Amino acid sequence: MIKIYVDRPSLSSEEINSRRDFNHILNQLPKKKVWLSPWFYGAVGLSSVFIAATLILLMK
Amino acid sequence: MKTNAMYYQSSFLLAEELQIIEKAKLNPAHFAPLYKKYHEAIFRYVIKRVDEEEAAYDITSCVFIKALTNIQRYEFRGVPFSSWLFRIAKSELYQSFRDNKTKRTVNIDSIQIAQLVEDFTEVYSEENKAKLLKALPLLKENQLQLIEMRFFEKRSFREMGEIIGLTENNTKVKTFRALVKLKDIFNKLK
């Protein structure tokens, strides 16, 4: 059943603003998965090429 | 009827908001000015509809977390960013009601009751006031929502439409129907 409040005392702006916490919001954000970043693929790709090239050179 | 002033912003302010949003898409920390600007408005929207203060603070936090998580999907449509936030707040509230975390409440002040009663009967009395308070919970949720936004929060039809996902005209028609329904329930009550 829906409750109806008549003339419920409202909170002051100061009271509401004192509960503002942007860092809490930022900390609650889901962490970005590293393997979804293009930088991850770039770094892994470049390292692989470098390692492969080194191995080929060493084997010659 | 006076309407919600926060909704009406100059094109300069809208452009400024858009700039912050674009920066926040790259780095969520840039969202801080919008959080500061709209935190209180979103909290007040939520607290009017829930029983407990702590639950209202939690839901408000969820609104901003959801907004930031989905900021990449935000598209500017020439209206203030607040409309998008209120839309998220609405969906978070209903999720909370479905999960039985909070109870739905309606906040109304005596002046608003008197105005509505006078619209219906032209005579304001304690008896009519009690009748209206009995009639309101008998409306369907979507009708109550429209009455609440229009008559208790003084929102424009355009803003209401953006929050509930309807056109301005459709919102106007549905609000009128909700008012007729409320009047009908009111007149049937003894």
Image (cartoon, rainbow, N blue to C red):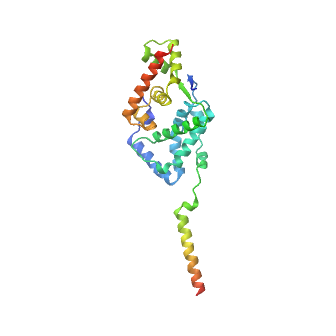
- On the question of residue B1 being in view, the answer is no
Residue at 52% in and 53% down: B27
> Which x, y percent locates residue A16?
58, 35
Please state which of residues B72 and B145 is positioned toward the viewer in this rendering: B145
Residue at 50% in and 54% down: B26
- The quadrant in which the N terminus of chain B is found is top left
Residue at 49% in and 38% down: B86
Q: What is the count of numbered marks? A: 0
- Pick out the residue farthest to the left: B169
Considering only vertical position in the picture, is A3 above or below B120?
below
- Pick out the residue farthest to the bottom: A60
> Which x, y percent locates residue A33?
58, 58
Considering only vertical position in the picture, is B138 above or below B45?
above
> Which x, y percent locates residue B63?
54, 41
> Which x, y percent locates residue A55?
59, 81
**A17 relative to B158 in the view: left or right:** right
Considering only vertical position in the picture, is A37 above or below B58?
below
Which quadrant holds residue A56? bottom right
- On the question of residue B106 being in view, the answer is yes
